[in-house]
Amino acid sequence: RTLIGQFTIGGMTCAACVNSVEGILRNLPGVKKAVVALATSLGEVEYDPRFISKEDIATAIEDAGFEASFVQ
Ligand code: 9UX
């Protein structure tokens, strides 16, 4: 199973922030793909809901010092 989660990510100010958030996301269990865009503050994550929830993905972003909210 694969779901797509879209997040608005606050607090990213440079390209290294983007790499950092992508790295965090890609290392989470159940995350198959993660793309983060600095210009739009958007992150799109493909994940398997058997291993991780949208809420847990947002919490991981916040634990890294950024703000995360769900799109839609
Ligand atoms: Mo850039 Mo981001 O110098 O956590 S890495 S602001």
Image: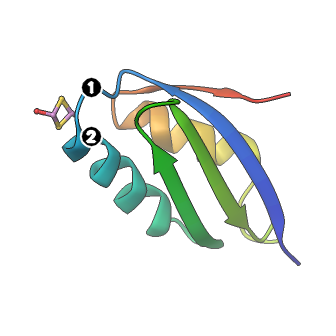
Residue drawn at point x = 44 percent, y = 31 percent: 39
- Tell me the element at label 2: helix
Nearest the camera: 66 or 19?
Answer: 19
**Mark 1: C-beta under 8 Å from nearest atom of ligand 1:** yes
Disc 1 marks a residue whose amino acid type is Thr
In the rendered structure, are the residues bearing label 1 and label 2 in contact, judged by CB atoms less than 8 Å apart?
Answer: yes
Q: How many marks?
A: 2
Colour mapping used in the image: rainbow
Instruction: Tell me the quadrant of the picture where the C terminus can be found.
Output: top right
Query: Is residue 30 left or right of 64 when viewed as pictured?
Result: right
Look at the picture and state if 48 lies above or below 40: below
- Amino acid type, label 2: Cys
Residue at coordinates 35% horizontally, 61% vertically from top-left? 23
Outermost residue, front direction?
39
Q: Quadrant of residue 12?
A: top left
Q: Position of residue 28 (x, y in %)?
A: 51, 65
Mark 1 is surrounded, within 10 Å at the Cα level, by few (under 14), some (14 to 19) or many (20 or more) other residues, namely: few
> Residue under circle 2?
17
Q: Is residue 23 above or below residue 61?
A: below
In front: 71, or 56?
71
Vertical placement of 22 versus 13: above or below?
below
Is residue 58 rendered to the left or right of residue 5? left
Residue 48, given in percent of the width and then of the height, sits at 77, 71
Q: Is residue 53 left or right of residue 62?
A: right
Q: Position of residue 40 (x, y in %)?
A: 52, 30
x then y, percent, for residue 49: 82, 65
Going 59% across and 70% down the picture, which residue do you hit?
Answer: 33
Mark 2 CB near ligand 1 (8 Å cut):
yes
Residue designated by label 1: 13
The N terminus sits in image quarter: bottom right
Dividing the image into four equal quarters, which quarter contains ligand 1? top left
